[in-house]
């Protein structure tokens, strides 16, 4: 390996080079990314598995969404309906299916909601990270779900106006060209150096 290559390799891997990259990134994002990095570094690293209830809720939601589960439910209804003449279509016979479906539905609401809450929070965090990391993206949109309904409607009208402006362009590629994508890619590469 040549001296220039070794020198280049050392300069890119040195703490000073890393700090200058971090400083440039932090400056670009008004210091927000540096604060997020410090926050992430301060969080305890945990290899713990999810709690028992969380694992149960996730597994149940996965199983409930499978075709075989639906088929099992249909078979249960068919068996119940077929036994109707045996029990004379009595009130007890009807009560069995009503009680069973009510209990299953009641419990599934909580299990599925638990899974939805976790997935929704994870998606929000991922979107927040994308917004925070993108140069030029408005950090005001981070945690937008916490805004009032009126504020969200105001933002929606703003973005609808942008959509209307984009629709006036004759071509789909008029506002986002290959050249624009190439320019953004080169800007990102320059920002990493």
Image (cartoon, grey):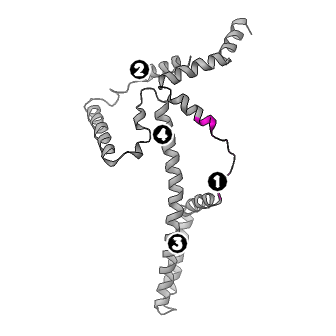
> In this rendering, which labeled residue sits more in front, label 4 or label 2?
4
Upstream in sequence: badge 4 or badge 1: 1
Q: Does dot 2 land on a helix, a strand or a loop?
A: helix
- The residue that label 1 is drawn on is 50
- The residue that label 2 is drawn on is 179
> In this rendering, which labeled residue sits more in front, label 2 or label 3?
3
Q: Quadrant of the C terminus?
A: top right
**CB within 8 Å, label 4 to label 2:** no
Instruction: Judge left or right: residue 153 versus residue 115.
Output: left
Name the residue at 48% across, 22% down: 28
Could you tell me residue 171's position as x and y percent? 30, 29
Asked whether the viewer can see residue 186, the reply is yes
| Vertical order, 32 against 18 (above or below) | below
| Vertical order, 53 against 47 (above or below) | below
Check disc 2: other Cα within 10 Å, few if <14, some if 14-19, many if 20+: few
**CB within 8 Å, label 2 to label 3:** no
Distance in Å between CA atoms under marks 3 and 4: 34 Å
The residue furthest right is: 1
Q: Does dot 3 land on a helix, a strand or a loop?
A: helix
The residue furthest top is: 3
Could you tell me residue 79's position as x and y percent? 53, 81
Name the residue at 69% across, 6% down: 4
Could you tell me residue 105's position as x and y percent? 49, 70
Mark carried by residue 127: 4
Mark carried by residue 93: none
- The residue that label 3 is drawn on is 104
> In this rendering, which labeled residue sits more in front, label 3 or label 4?
4
Q: Quadrant of residue 184?
A: top left
């Amino acid at each position: 390996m040549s001296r220039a290559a070794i020198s280049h390799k050392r300069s890119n891997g040195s703490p000073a080079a890393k700090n200058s990259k971090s400083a440039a990134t932090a400056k670009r994002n008004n210091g927000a990314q540096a604060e997020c990095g410090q926050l992430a570094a301060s969080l305890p690293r945990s290899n713990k598995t999810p709690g028992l209830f969380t694992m149960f809720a996730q597994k149940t939601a996965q199983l409930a969404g499978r075709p075989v589960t639906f088929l099992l439910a249909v078979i249960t209804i068919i068996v119940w309906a077929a036994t109707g003449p045996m029990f004379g279509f009595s009130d007890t016979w009807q009560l069995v299916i009503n009680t069973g479906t009510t209990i299953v539905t009641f419990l599934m609401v909580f299990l599925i909601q638990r899974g939805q809450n976790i997935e929704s929070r994870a998606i929000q965090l991922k979107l927040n990270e994308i917004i925070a990391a993108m140069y030029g993206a408005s950090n005001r949109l981070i945690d937008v779900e916490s805004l009032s309904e009126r504020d969200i409607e105001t933002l929606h009208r703003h973005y609808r106006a942008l959509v209307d402006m984009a629709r006036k362009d004759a071509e789909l590629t008029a506002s986002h060209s290959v050249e624009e994508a190439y320019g953004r890619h080169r800007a990102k590469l320059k920002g990493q150096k």
